[in-house]
């Protein structure tokens, strides 16, 4: 299969990722100026959702429409994939009918298997291992507000989950230092830590992680599929709540990000999203623009003029 996929940030060079992010900023400017730009006219994105979604569905669906194409939403109830059809068979069929496929799933292996049998690009809209599309948006947001993130220090506070794993990949690709503060037993994947080497450090004290940081990010303490662990996690993670006082320990120009949805009073204090250092709404909007740039890159790699 010759199609190029986006399952992980490691699939791309730093130059390619930087190009997609800069293109996202250009596409954002075109939309803000009301310029009609439809390079994907008559193209179709198939979207498979095994996990519920707000930002991923709206950003990909709206993005395809704005680029002149269309998107088809498929839940497990809507396809034979949810009724036992082999993933490879579904990939072979779908990729003969659409121009790209975005999948939001649980097991990362589902993405890998689907991509292995797909003749069109497959995009990771989220898996239990990674959330690379969110990191494109996060890196675009930092670039817009503060310039290059190269050489900066980023703090991740909370669970070493799929978002944390993607921040580790971003640290490798965008050349920044990452400090992860988490309770014992909730570290990010050892495989990702090994890949990053001394670029990533794991600490227990969130104050130590945040000290002097240029970007602080967090996520919910209980992800989809972990609901039975909620009470245990609330107790373990209570010292890891990000507050205005914690941000005060960071660099004076620090930005705070959250991939949303946020649970105010849990992983963040009730007032944190109102702090001028918090940019979650820009971050959420940039899912649209970064993913439009990614779609343009994958579906029409030779089309560049606006």
Image (tube, grey):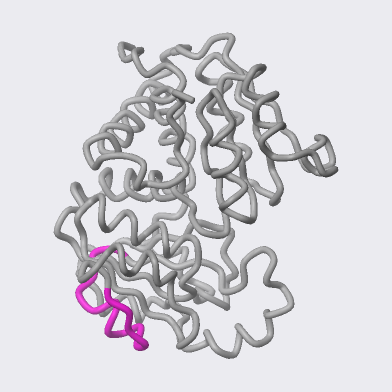
Q: Is residue 288 left or right of residue 178?
A: right
Image x and y of residue 137, in percent: 40, 45
Q: Nearer the viewer, residue 2 or 129?
A: 2
Q: Is residue 273 left or right of residue 171?
A: right
Which quarter of the rendered picture does the C terminus lie within?
Answer: top left
For the point 45% across and 83% down, which residue is it? 240
Q: Quadrant of residue 61?
A: top right
- Disc count in the image? 0
Image x and y of residue 161, in percent: 50, 67
Q: Nearer the viewer, residue 158 or 168?
A: 168
For the point 68% across and 79% down, which residue is it? 230
Q: Nearer the viewer, residue 133 or 4?
A: 4
Image x and y of residue 9, in percent: 37, 46
For the point 74% across and 78% down, which residue is it? 228
Q: Is residue 97 left or right of residue 23?
A: right
Residue 210 is one of the magenta-drawn residues = yes
Asked if residue 44 is positioned above or below residue 186 in the image, the reply reads above
Magenta-drawn segment: 201-215
For the point 35% across and 81% down, which residue is it? 245
Asked if residue 12 is positioned above or below residue 233 in the image, the reply reads above
Residue 287 is one of the magenta-drawn residues = no
Image x and y of residue 145, in percent: 26, 48
Asked if residue 100 is positioned above or below residue 124 in the image, the reply reads above
Q: Is residue 275 left or right of residue 131?
A: left
């Amino acid at each position: 299969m010759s199609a190029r996929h986006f399952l992980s940030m490691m699939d791309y060079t730093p130059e390619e990722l930087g190009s997609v992010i800069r293109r996202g900023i250009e596409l954002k400017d075109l939309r803000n100026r009301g310029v009609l730009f439809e390079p994907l006219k008559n193209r179709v994105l198939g979207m498979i959702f095994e996990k519920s979604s707000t930002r991923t569905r709206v950003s990909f669906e709206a993005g395809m429409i704005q680029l002149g194409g269309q998107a088809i939403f498929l839940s497990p109830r809507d396809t034979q994939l949810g009724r036992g059809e082999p993933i490879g068979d579904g990939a072979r069929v779908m990729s003969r009918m659409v121009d790209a496929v975005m999948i939001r799933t649980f097991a990362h292996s589902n993405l890998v298997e689907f991509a292995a049998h797909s003749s069109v690009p497959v995009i990771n809209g989220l898996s239990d291992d990674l959330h690379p599309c969110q990191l494109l948006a996060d890196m675009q947001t930092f670039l817009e507000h503060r310039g290059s993130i190269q050489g900066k220090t980023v703090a991740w506070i909370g669970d070493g989950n799929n978002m944390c794993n993607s921040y580790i990949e971003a640290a490798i690709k965008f050349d920044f230092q990452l400090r992860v503060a988490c309770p014992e037993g909730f570290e990010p994947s050892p495989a990702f830590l090994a890949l990053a080497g001394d670029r990533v450090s794991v600490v227990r004290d969130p104050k130590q992680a945040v000290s002097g940081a240029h970007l602080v990010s967090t996520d919910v303490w209980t992800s989809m599929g972990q609901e039975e662990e909620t009470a245990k996690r609330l107790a373990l993670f209570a010292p890891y709540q990000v507050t205005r006082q914690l941000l005060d320990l960071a660099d004076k120009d620090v930005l705070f990000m959250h991939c949303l949805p946020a649970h105010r009073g849990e992983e963040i204090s009730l007032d944190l999203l109102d702090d001028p250092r918090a940019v979650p709404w820009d971050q959420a909007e940039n899912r649209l623009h970064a993913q439009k740039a990614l779609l343009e890159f994958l579906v029409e790699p030779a089309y560049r003029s606006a």
